[in-house]
Amino acid sequence: MGEKTLTRMDLSEAVFREVGLSRNESAQLVESVLQHVSDALVAGETVKISSFGTFSVRDKAARVGRNPKTGEEVPISPRRVLSFRPSHLMKDRVAAGKG
């Protein structure tokens, strides 16, 4: 597996090449989309991108955890966590490898 990481700059460069906006406009577009997605998640909304997947925020209750080294019980406070569930199309595409 490759160690390449897709960055915001990579996304804006792809928009620049594919759509034909200027580099600056492409970067602003990517930032705007990411801001909309994160604002929706902060507000507790679900973000569904067809053929890609669904981002959602879940509330996890307080519970008792255990330190694996010492076996000592430790309280874990309630928190909100972000989860991503890929679509079946995305799962199939990733499983197929290159493409």
Image (spheres, rainbow, N blue to C red):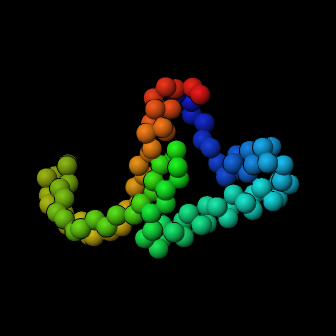
Q: With 17 as the anchor, is 42 left or right in this view?
A: left
The part of the image, by quadrant, that contains residue 64 is: bottom left
Q: Hey, which quadrant is residue 65 in on the image?
A: bottom left
- Nearer-the-camera pick, 36 or 68: 36
Residue 77, compared with residue 97, is above or below; it is below
Number of marks in picture? 0
Q: Looking at the picture, how far across and down is residue 98, in whole percent?
A: 57, 26
Q: Is residue 32 left or right of residue 20?
A: left
Tell me the residue at 64%/48% (across/down): 7
What's the residue at 44%, 63% (across, down)? 46
Q: Is residue 34 left or right of residue 55?
A: right
Does any portion of residue 40 appear in the rendered image? Answer: yes
Residue 13 shows in this picture: no
Q: Position of residue 87 (x, y in %)?
A: 45, 44
Is residue 66 or residue 79 the one in the foreground? 79
State whether residue 30 is above or below residue 43. Answer: above
Depth check, front residue: 34 or 63: 34
Residue 70 location (% of width, % of height): 16, 52
Q: Residue at x 48, y 71 (%)?
A: 42
Q: Nearer the viewer, residue 43 or 48?
A: 48
Q: Quadrant of the C terminus?
A: top right
Quadrant of the image occupied by residue 26: bottom right
Please state the horizontal and vertical placement of residue 35, each as a whole percent of the image.
61, 66
Residue lying at the far bottom in this picture: please name it: 43
Residue 23 in the image: above or below residue 91: below
* Left or right for 39, reference 66: right
| Residue at x 48%, y 38% (from the top left corner) | 89
